[in-house]
């Protein structure tokens, strides 16, 4: 007599065989998938760490560049403090007790001190009077007739001096150029 709730032995063996085959097939595929997922997780982790490291580097580089810029500016300002002090003393003189020559001499002294300080940091004046016109460092505003062909393209007058900073043009000199019309 067979119990209807208990399957026959032959049927149970067939059921186990069919259950085992897919499990064995799935276990090989599952192991490969698990290994691939682990490799993917490792690669993602490496990527995220590299990305975080790069972001930290970028932020550090920006911060270091700003700090270097501030140190450079503070060096320039420190060099100008003496001239600024002289200018402050000069600006507070009593005009009724000081003659015009003293005022002019004081202004020239402050200018000289400032230019000397800035020259120490790489600033150069571009004042090309009586030199050949160079469009790389000067801007011709107008021309005047030259007295001879030898004076052709020489700078006759400088309206505004130019400035170079470590070889880089900050502002061209604004000049009048002699032109021979022969």
Image: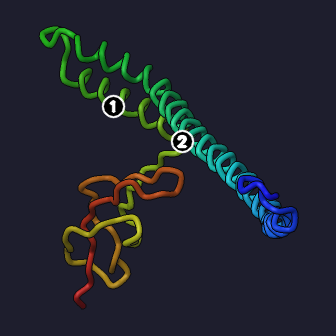
Towards the viewer: 84 or 129 = 84
Residue 11 locus on image (x, y percent)? 81, 67
Is 136 situated left or right of 160 in this image?
A: right
Task: Tell me if residue 49 comes above or below residue 154 in the rendering.
Answer: above
Please tell me which residue is depicted at 24% across the width and 67% down the height of the picture. 176
Tell me the crowding category of disc 2: few under 14, some 14 to 19, or many 20 or more residues within 10 angstroms, Cα based: few
Mark 2 or 1, nearer chain start = 2
Residue 64 locus on image (x, y percent)? 59, 37
- Report helix, strand or loop for mark 1: helix
Residue 38 locus on image (x, y percent)? 76, 54
Is 24 situated left or right of 79 in this image?
A: right
Towards the viewer: 102 or 72 = 72
- Check the picture and name the quadrant holding the N terminus: bottom right
Towards the viewer: 128 or 146 = 128
**Residue 109 visible in the shown view:** yes
**Circle number at residue 62:** 2
- Report helix, strand or loop for mark 2: helix
Please tell me which residue is depicted at 79% across the width and 64% down the height of the picture. 19
Please tell me which residue is depicted at 82% across the width and 62% down the height of the picture. 8
Distance from Cα at disc 2 to Cα at disc 1 = 40 Å
Q: Quadrant of residue 115?
A: top left
View extreme (left): residue: 96
Towards the viewer: 21 or 114 = 21
Q: Nearer the viewer, mark 2 or mark 1?
A: 2
Please tell me which residue is depicted at 24% across the width and 56% down the height of the picture. 159
Residue 173 locus on image (x, y percent)? 32, 59
**Circle number at residue 20:** none
**Residue 25 visible in the shown view:** no
Where does label 1 land, which residue?
Answer: 108
């Amino acid at each position: 007599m067979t119990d209807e709730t208990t399957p026959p032995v032959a049927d149970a063996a067939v059921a186990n065989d069919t259950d085992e085959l897919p499990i064995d097939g799935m276990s090989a595929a599952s192991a490969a998938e698990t290994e691939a997922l682990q490799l993917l997780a490792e690669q993602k982790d490496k990527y995220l760490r590299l990305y975080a490291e790069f972001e930290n580097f970028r932020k550090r580089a920006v911060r270091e560049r700003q700090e270097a810029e501030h140190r450079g500016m503070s060096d320039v300002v420190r060099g100008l403090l003496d001239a600024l002090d002289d200018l402050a003393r000069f600006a507070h003189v009593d005009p009724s007790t000081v003659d015009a020559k003293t005022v002019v001499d004081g202004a020239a002294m402050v200018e000289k001190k400032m230019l000397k300080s800035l020259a120490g940091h790489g600033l150069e004046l571009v004042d090309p009077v009586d030199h050949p016109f160079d469009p790389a460092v000067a801007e011709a505003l107008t021309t005047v007739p030259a007295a001879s062909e030898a004076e052709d393209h020489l700078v006759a007058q400088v309206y505004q001096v130019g400035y170079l900073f470590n070889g880089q043009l900050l502002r061209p000199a604004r000049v009048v150029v002699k032109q021979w019309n022969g």
